[in-house]
Image (tube, helix red, strand yellow):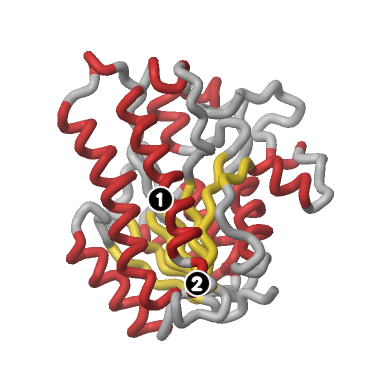
Amino acid sequence: MTFLNKTVFITGASRGIGKAIGLKLAREGANIVIAAKSAVENPKLGGTIFSAAVEMEKAGGKALAIQCDIRFEDQVQQAVDKTIEKFAGIDILVNNASAISLTPTEQTEPKRFDLMYDINVRGTFFVTKACIPHLKKSSHAHILTLSPPVNMSPKWFAKHLAYTLTKYNMSMMAMGWAEELRKYHIASNALWPKTTIDTAAVRNLLGGEALANMSRTPEILADAAYYIFSKSPSSCSGHCFIDEEVFAAEGITDLSKYSVVPGAELYTDLFVG
């Protein structure tokens, strides 16, 4: 599989996992659309759509930076229209943008609840809807949603019910699209890490540097996504992948290079185990 001149539309690609996936495919010659909100750098988060675009092009791809808040359908449609104007199609969609608030019911404010639903569920749904007409025209169409296997163990609902609902909604959509779009030869899968990943969310919201040092780098998900996208859409669809399982299927068991701190004990991510 060659990704040369394939167009990849990634939400939330100005940093973290989305950016890592973009860079991986840019190195393969892909066109990367960075659809995210960050046009001005936040020192706590780092990176903008423009700085990410520079990195994508240095890596060997072509890039299009589009400021887009996926809560608003008009911005989503404009982003898709700009993508088609520049690259004439969309081959791969990565639903990466997500909001997180790990609060129990009594501590979950309405604005936080709404933010997670507007981005994780509603935003993911309508970004995908806008891309489907163009994915139908691709000879190698994939949708990848960054969400976990639906694990019905009560412990995943007890501590952060609102967040859990939204992430499981994303996975349910990924499975739904696999079946709905099968006749168009469009693959749809979900992907989730076995361990925590060193991102701004981990450092700023979840566990600081201590948790980041027990995590893997975003590149593990970028490489896992690469293996998924390398498969035929007809033969690889309808899965909720864990990154380690993707590597195991490729015969790769040594993942030590992805550890932020070599040899450190790794922290298992939410919804796994």
Between the C-alphas of marks 1 and 2, the distance is 17 Å
Q: Residues within 10 Å of mark 1 (few under 14, many from 20)?
A: many
Answer with mark 1 or mark 2, whichever residue precedes in sequence: 1
Query: Which quadrant of the figure contains the C terminus?
Result: top right
183 to 115, vertically: above or below: below
SS of the residue at dot 2?
helix
Q: Residue 173: which disc?
A: 1
From the top left corner, tell me how far across and down residue 58 is, in percent: 56, 69
Vertical position of residue 52 compared to residue 58: above or below: above
Dot 2 crowding, Cα within 10 Å, few <14, some 14–19, many 20+: few
Q: Are marks 1 and 2 in contact (CB under 8 Å)?
A: no
Q: Nearer the viewer, residue 21 or 52?
A: 21
Asked if one can make out residue 215 in the rendered structure from this viewpoint, the answer is: yes
- Closest to the observer: 29 or 57? 29
Residue at 31% in and 20% down:
103
Circle 1 SS class:
helix
Q: Nearer the viewer, mark 1 or mark 2?
A: 2
Q: Amino acid at mark 2?
A: Lys
Report the residue at 31% width, 72% height from top. 80
Instruction: Tell how many labels.
Output: 2
Q: In the image, residue 163 lies at what x, y percent? A: 35, 30
Q: Position of residue 94 (x, y in %)?
A: 46, 58
The quarter of the picture where residue 135 lies is bottom left
**Residue picked out by circle 2:** 183
Q: Which mark is residue 139?
A: none
Is residue 53 in view from this perspective? no
* Identity, as a three-letter code, of the amino acid under mark 1: Met
Residue sitting at x 74%, y 31%? 262
Depth check, front residue: 152 or 106: 152
Which residue is found at the position 69% from the left and 74% from the top? Answer: 1
Residue 116, image x, y percentages: 28, 38
